[in-house]
Amino acid sequence: MELLNLYQNNYLIVFVFLCLGVLLPVVALYLGKLLRPHKPSVEKYTTYESGIDPFHDSRVQFNVRYYIFALMFVIFDVETVFLYPWAVAYDKLGVFALIEMLIFVIMLLIGLIYAWKKKVLQWI
């Protein structure tokens, strides 16, 4: 019976954190809406609030390479996030974890070589 209570308490804690994670941003946004000054004007509804009239459409088309370059940065940034805990606990993990991490790094290197061959990493 005590094991069942412990099991239910774990779900209760998750539920409380889930409710707090949803409730706190909603309350903060609602309070911000209530407390902020609301003085709409024609200037505030323009594309830029700099005082200069917009002279062209605000939607400018960018080259896709910039997004791919940023995506590559995020991928290799996430790699370091995975490598750090592994490096901290390396002594306790053993040879199996070393082989797993080598496979992970080799897969990332293959992706880097592929991106290099496709000339994704060249900045225009």
Image (cartoon, grey):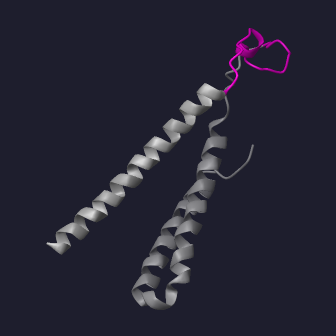
Asked whether 78 or 85 is in front, the reply is 85
Secondary structure, magenta segment, majority class: loop
Asked whether 109 or 22 is in front, the reply is 22
* Residue 63 sits above or below residue 71 on the image: above
Q: Residue at x 43, y 87 (%)?
A: 93
Locate residue 13: give its quadrant: bottom left
Quadrant location, the C terminus? top right
Locate residue 75: give its quadrant: bottom right
Check if residue 38 falls in the magenta segment.
Answer: yes
Residue bounds of the magenta highlight: 36-55
**Among all residues in the image, which is located at the extreme left?**
1
Asked whether 81 or 3 is in front, the reply is 3
Check if residue 8 falls in the magenta segment.
Answer: no
Question: Position of 25 compared to 55: left or right?
Answer: left
Query: How far from the left and from the top, in percent, is residue 123?
Result: 73, 47
Locate residue 7: give its quadrant: bottom left
Query: How far from the left and from the top, in percent, is residue 1?
Result: 13, 72
Q: Residue at x 51, y 78 (%)?
A: 86
Question: Position of 69 compared to 1: left or right?
Answer: right
Q: How many marks?
A: 0
* Residue 120 sits above or below residue 107 on the image: above
Asked whether 92 or 44 is in front, the reply is 44
Q: Residue at x 67, y 53 (%)?
A: 121
Query: How far from the left and from the top, in percent, is residue 51?
Result: 85, 16
Q: Residue at x 30, y 58 (%)?
A: 12
Question: Position of 54 compared to 76: left or right?
Answer: right
